Image (tube, rainbow, N blue to C red):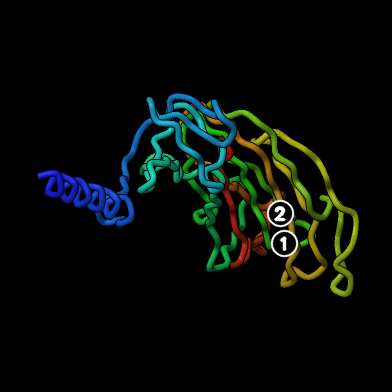
Amino acid sequence: MTDGFALAQGIAQASRQAGRDDPAVRRAEVQTGIVTAVAVTPGTVDVGSIRARRLETYQQPAVGDQVLLVQSGSGSWWAAGRTATSASPPLGLPRQAWKTVTLDRTTSTLTDDPDLTMTLDANGTFKVEFHLHFEATDAARFRTAWTVPAGATGVRSAVGPDQGQILSSTSSGGVGRWGVHAFGTACIYGSRNDNTLQCFAMEEGTVFTTAAGTCALQWAQSTTSTTASRLAAGSYMRVTRLA
């Protein structure tokens, strides 16, 4: 009787040990949850009663984030990161738009570029950049402004050839502009003495939104000319959500 009891205990103990050693038995778990507290312990988030260690890629955690939780077989919890939604781009992940075809304009009316445009979500903070390759005659020049969602706040910087500058075909250097402006303030850039040669300008700014809407580069000639000003293929826009 005693030997039989001891044998049963031995079998039970061996089964428990096998279960602890075998991932197929002890099992892990994957689930989602809402963050209720951040950094109670450095590098962690709380999801209800679960305290989970954040992966390095899960940056800028916030209460209310819906996150993917992974539990190891040993019982430890890990917060892999936010789950994606159709309404909100991931924080820190740049989105790009670019021109594949050069566009010509012979008007001084500022209009959104059809390619360099994106939708910004409400109640967000976005880093917006435009990298522009443009061509224009000395008289017509190249002029820009930004479309932003209603109620958005912030400013933009503008770097490129100064509006009074005419660059030569043998030297692409010259006087530059370094101003910071409101989104809707028109910025005029200089050009080169040959409208088949491109100039470069870069504009960037941080946009704080309260409502969702379009962010786009507006551009036109400074002075109407029958010789087109153009925004060239390869120009691009980059938007990164910061918060």
Q: Quadrant of the N terminus?
A: top left
Q: State the image coordinates of residue 127 (x, y, percent, origin top left).
A: 62, 42
**61 left or right of 10 in image:** right
First in residue order: circle 2 vs circle 1: 1
Kindly identify the residue that appears in the image at 59 percent across and 67 percent down.
233
Residue holding disc 2:
142
Q: CA distance from mark 2 to mark 1?
A: 6 Å
- In which quadrant of the rendered view does residue 142 lie? bottom right
Q: Which kind of residue does numbered mark 1 sit on?
A: Ala
**54 left or right of 77 in image:** right
Kindly identify the residue that appears in the image at 75 percent across and 46 percent down.
158
Label 1: how many Cα within 10 Å (few below 14, some 14–19, many 20+): many
**129 left or right of 69 in image:** right
Kindly identify the residue that appears in the image at 35 percent across and 48 percent down.
73
Callout 2 touching callout 1 (CB < 8 Å): yes
Q: State the image coordinates of residue 26 (x, y, percent, origin top left).
A: 28, 49
- Of residues 11 and 238, which is closer to you in this image? 11
Determine if residue 228 is in view.
yes
